[in-house]
Image: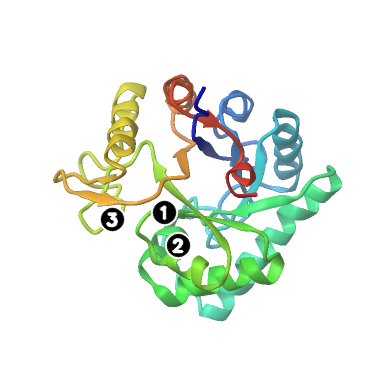
Amino acid sequence: MTEKPLLNLNADLGESYGAWRMGDDDALLRLVQSANLACGFHAGDPVTMGRTVRLALAAGASLGAHPSYPDLQGFGRRAMRCSIEEVEALVLYQIGALDGFARAAGTRVSHIKPHGALSNESCRDPALAAAIARAARAYDRDLILLAPAHSRLAEAGLAAGLTVAIEIFADRAYDDDGALAPRGEPGAVLHGSAACRAHVAAVLAAGGLVTRSGKILPTPIHSICVHGDGPDAVAIAADLHRFLKENYSLAPLPALFF
């Protein structure tokens, strides 16, 4: 019998803060194989970080740092004027913070995935992308960089000698340059499990991003992201989990490369 190819399903988790609750991490960790955990700059706090690390470890999900600009009020989705030195330092700071909780729980952070505006800008800006890649490599050259398809960030990771996992988003539409359609535009964010499943199925069948105009941008695909903060996150992840298991073996990110 032919073995099924490996694929990864990931989610952005640990995004509660203090008394404020965001998402259903427990339910999502029963469905995804890798967790990108907020490190306190756009969401998350020390107690939330420690708790979510333990939940992910119990679920068998690999851990990723999800660093962002220091923007709690804007959930990390607002661009900020930071120098390259500042970006490198704030990314390194956040990886180390999460890895401290991981080590205390008997595990390690195995990947990094920038969040929000930091991710979006690094997809277009080679200098910013290189700063993120340098910070990841400086912390641990074995870290996997989880980066969007057709991005400067993916290119910077490869140039830095990092293992790069290419991801697509289950709930976001793409423009012809490979960038995510801006959130404020109609149709940029997909809602409901049926729409997200159809989007993912089309991308996997095409072997590349399928843009809003119907253009296909070929790319390898290692991981599919479900945003954990959406109201349909658990339903979307459950539907994708069932659908993907028909043709793939779902595995944590390190299992795809090491």
Q: Is residue 247 left or right of residue 189?
A: right
Report the residue at 34% width, 30% height from top. Answer: 196
Of 120 and 215, the residue lying toward us? 215
Secondary element type, mark 1: strand
Q: Where residue 245 appears, x then y in whole percent? A: 48, 23
Which circle marks residue 154 in the picture?
Answer: 2
Instruction: Looking at the image, tell me whether mark 2 or mark 3 is earlier in sequence order.
Output: 2
Which circle marks residue 178 in the picture?
Answer: 3
Q: Given the current orientation, which residue lies at the most extreme left position?
A: 213
Give the residue type that dot 1 points to. Pro
Q: Are marks 2 and 3 in contact (CB under 8 Å)?
A: no
Secondary element type, mark 2: helix
Give the residue type that dot 2 points to. Ala
Q: Is residue 240 left or right of residue 35?
A: left
Report the residue at 70% width, 32% height from top. Answer: 60
Using the image, determine if residue 215 lies above or below residue 93: above
Q: Where residue 121 appears, x then y in whole percent? A: 40, 65
